[in-house]
Amino acid sequence: MIVPKHYENLQVLHENTMPNRCYYIPASKIMHTLVHNRKESDRFQLLNDQWNFRYYSSIYELQENFYEKDFIGEEYELVTVPGMWQNYGFDKHQYTNIKYPFPFDPPYVPHDNPCGTYTYDFDYKKCKDAPKAYLNFEGVDSCFYVWVNGEYVGYSQVSHSTSEFDITDILVEGKNRLAVLVLKWCDGSYMEDQDKFRMSGIFNDVYILHRPEKIIYDYFVKTSYIDTKAIVTVEVKFLNNNGTLAKATLSKANSEIIASKEISESTVLEYEIENPELWNPENPYLYFLILETEHEVITERIGIREIHIENNVVIFNGKPIIFRGVNRHDSDPVTGFVISIDQMKKDMEMMKQHNFNAIRSSHYPNQPFFYQLCDEYGFFVVDEADNESHGPGEIYFANDEFEYKSKRWNEPISDNPAYIEATVDRVKLCVEREKNRPCIVIWSMGNECAYGCTFEEALKWTKSFDDSRLTHFESARYHSDKKKYDFSNLDMFSRMYPPFNEIDEYLEGNPDKPFILIEYCHSMGNGPGDFEDYFQIFQREEIMCGGFVWEWCDHAIYKGDTEENQEMYYYGGDHGEDVHDSNFCMDGLVYPDRTPHTGLLEYKNVYRPLRVAEFDQKAKNISFHNYLDFTDVKDYIQMKYEVLCDGHVVEEGTLETPSIKPGCTEMTSLEIKIPEKGNAFLEIYYYSSKEVALVPEGHLLGFDEVKLETADNRNQEVIQKLEESGDSNKALLTKETDEFVFIFGEQFQYVLDKKTGMFTKLEYAGINQIEKPMEVNIWRAPTDNDMYIKLEWYRAKYDKAYSRAYDTVVEISENRVNIHCYMALVANTVQRILDMDTTWIIDENGAIGLNMKVKRHPEFPMLPRFGLRLFMNKNMDYVQYYGMGPMESYCDKHRASSHGIYGGYVEDLHEDYIKPQENGSHYDCSYVTVESAHCKLEALAEKSFSFNVSAYTQEELTAKKHNFELQPSDNTILCLDYAQSGIGSNSCGPDLLEKYRLDSKEFEFGIKLIPYKKYK
């Protein structure tokens, strides 16, 4: 083997790396736009380029000294650095959540450890004023060895960190060769078991910093704020404390100098600012600190802010705050971990425009410019060390598995003294590099590692090093029967996905720390459905300081387009990998290409910055509550309103925004005319009144929908149609056989199957509007959030259920045919699921009324849905409805929708989740019509219902793994639902709340179907 086995040696984490320091890019002149101009620094030599690369499936296959300066190898390919070698076509992608992709045998990894060799030739010219050269790697997975001009430089690990080497004495004027050996796994891989695709290679920037002999090497900025005065302290450290002369200048954003101080040795500077501009996510004001030595300038941006805990409440700049946050991975379906500034900015722009104010860097530090962008655009950040040793929770244990996972899975790593140095190292690399970023308000020790001596030491170091921020570590909730752990250096109590009753238990238990949901609302597939429920808890309990939604984007690998130009995305198991966790990586608020899920739209409106607190319809007074933390809404929001009745706008206008301080409620008048009758609503729309960071002027921030009370709150158009009687002058005949009931009218012929109690034919004006028998329908294609309850649904045979009629009685009364069916819903091997007392009423115009009295057998679990399923002619492809739209909506997921009249083609009502599942339903509807060029069927009811119209059967959606595999039905499928169970977030979150479950023992479903012939 050409290298020593540092990759299996816990005593060698780094070799010949420079001491930890804060992040900066020096230059010979002041640079005020740090993020975008770092590559313009004359002291910054970027080595990103096309490099020579060769892949080996085992380290033992590498026998040649590829790193020698004049080595000429064979079978090398040119690849882009930064990049992932799986994206080059080597090795294979693998997604796993908790499971290690290799045997659990720390610190050892498989002998056949895949690796890649990289070589790159570059020119170097020694700078007179900056003769020193420091080689930087900002991200390599998992570990690497470095040579320059054939000489060994050093070794490092911790994938998401910066490794810096002094290569001054190795470089020569002119051509130089850099050689890097990267291994797929190392002992650090046991601590990098994050929920993501596992990829390998040099995935972040590689560059050389040219620097003078005498330099400021490190500095630490802290700020505090009391009354009207801010204190800025800067601890400056020179390299080797060599008597370098320097000047430190603090200035405002407009370059107006506040103070300038000269220093010549490592020291602590202090600046006082009267009436400062404070940094916060709503006004991310930044000062400048200029550190100058004879031949070098370091430009730093400073945000003045202060965070602490007071009476178990998180206080920021003197005010209680709520984190409206989201967890974010570096993830792109094409580039993998390789994320540019523009890609990050796109994510942040979408987050800002959907009302997020915080990001958690799950589960590792991001590139340095990520934090500078957060400083600039205004996001709170939870910065997380590159540490997740989740895998021990999956190893074999002979006794009780729950006991092991809950109390003993910390033993191999997190409570193992052998891992103290490695754990603390990862925390130091995170904290010391980003210690000057004002956006960072919480240090996270890592994710899902359990707890133990390693984290006790990491927390102790963190609090002693930086007392200006808060600390959290969710895994600290794991306890041991063998010893009592030290939690004194933890500032917050954090949980992931706790049931609501557990939150209440904590709040009622005399807590001593604020409660943060570091992950909640698992946004997998169609979901989540509980944003509003969590919002209410955050607002009701000051000790609850908010949370971070899991997660921002679906993780997937782009595999090109189908012949029909549909994008193909692969997830776990699609690459032939043995160990994987299927589509559990598809759990974001946006698709891989950043198209929003409907869940993102739901979040946006739940967390709108302004809400109607109360509307006094009689007095015409309306109260608004300001949910911003630092901004008077008068300075940011403009409002418009509409009054709608039965979906029609009957009044609209603008409303002057009153002055409402953060967290306060104020009342203003709103003189509107209330409709006399009908289903009426007041809609208030909130727009940004000015451009702020990433949010343009006129951007819709959210809306409120307020129900108005009228003399008759029902949709008048629907009531009129429901109350219409048939034409007694038209003939209405029936015929019965043992199997069927035939109903004949002037324009229609209907057939009802006496074995099922359902219609098999609905012919109107010569066109049969259903091409297969109508069904009683309780199945839905399981959503990702049905992950656990679907197992009960399958066990109960809900997917195989069908109706069985026991008795059918036909009566003709005046201009009506009444068909009474005593029915049940049954499936093979199980008892009756439902009893249904059903009455069909057909009038002489062909309208069909349905009333079903339903009883659920108490042994069975909650129903996915209950209603009718109709298989209609494929040409019936246009839909119009009155209800909640225009996006999909469910009983617990409809805050992004509003009541109105909406329309669209069937294909446009399909939400194309990458793993197919239930989608596209619409909640609280009064009517829906499905039509072709020649005919139309309308469904309406006095009591609101849900519906779904799709080109895909629920069986097809259930069976297929990927959206690009879906085959459309030969029919348009219309589902008319009494109700569906809610969506929830139980793929990882708590059980669906009872109020959203369709588990009533008895209920009654009524609906009316009216066919029409269209005339051109």
Image (tube, rainbow, N blue to C red):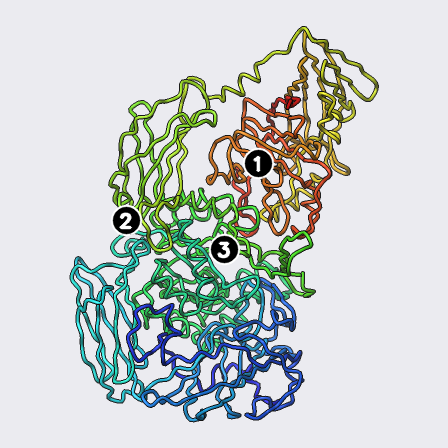
Q: Is residue 21 above or below residue 492?
A: below
Does the rendering let one see residue 785? yes
| Residue that badge 1 annotates | 904
Is residue 131 toward the left or the right of residue 332 in the image? left
| Label 1 neighbour load within 10 Å: few <14, some 14-19, many 20+ | some
The numbered mark, 1 or 3, whose residue comes first in the sequence reads 3
Query: Which residue is at the front of the view, 486 or 773?
Result: 773
Q: Which amino acid lies under the numbered mark 3 shown in the image of this protein?
A: Glu
Alpha carbon distance from label 1 to label 3: 30 Å
Residue 617: where, in percent of width, then height?
Answer: 33, 25
> Dots 1 and 2: beta carbons under 8 Å?
no
Residue 509: where, in percent of width, then height?
Answer: 39, 49
The numbered mark, 1 or 2, whose residue comes first in the sequence reads 2
Q: Secondary structure at mark 2?
A: loop
| Label 2 neighbour load within 10 Å: few <14, some 14-19, many 20+ | some
Q: Is residue 914 above or below residue 643?
A: below
Is residue 1014 toward the left or the right of residue 519 in the image? right
- Residue at 38% x, 48% y: name it: 507
Q: Which amino acid lies under the numbered mark 1 shown in the image of this protein?
A: Gly
Q: Which amino acid lies under the numbered mark 2 shown in the image of this protein?
A: Thr
- Residue at 49% x, 55% y: name it: 552
Is residue 130 toward the left or the right of residue 1 in the image? left
Does the rendering let one see residue 1011? no
Alpha carbon distance from label 1 to label 2: 39 Å
State the quadrant of the N terminus.
Answer: bottom right
| Residue that badge 3 annotates | 551
- Residue at 49% x, 62% y: name it: 329
Alpha carbon distance from label 2 to label 3: 27 Å
Residue 36: where, in percent of width, then height?
Answer: 38, 68
Q: Secondary structure at mark 1?
A: strand
| Residue that badge 2 annotates | 631
Query: Which residue is at the front of the view, 669 or 219?
Result: 669
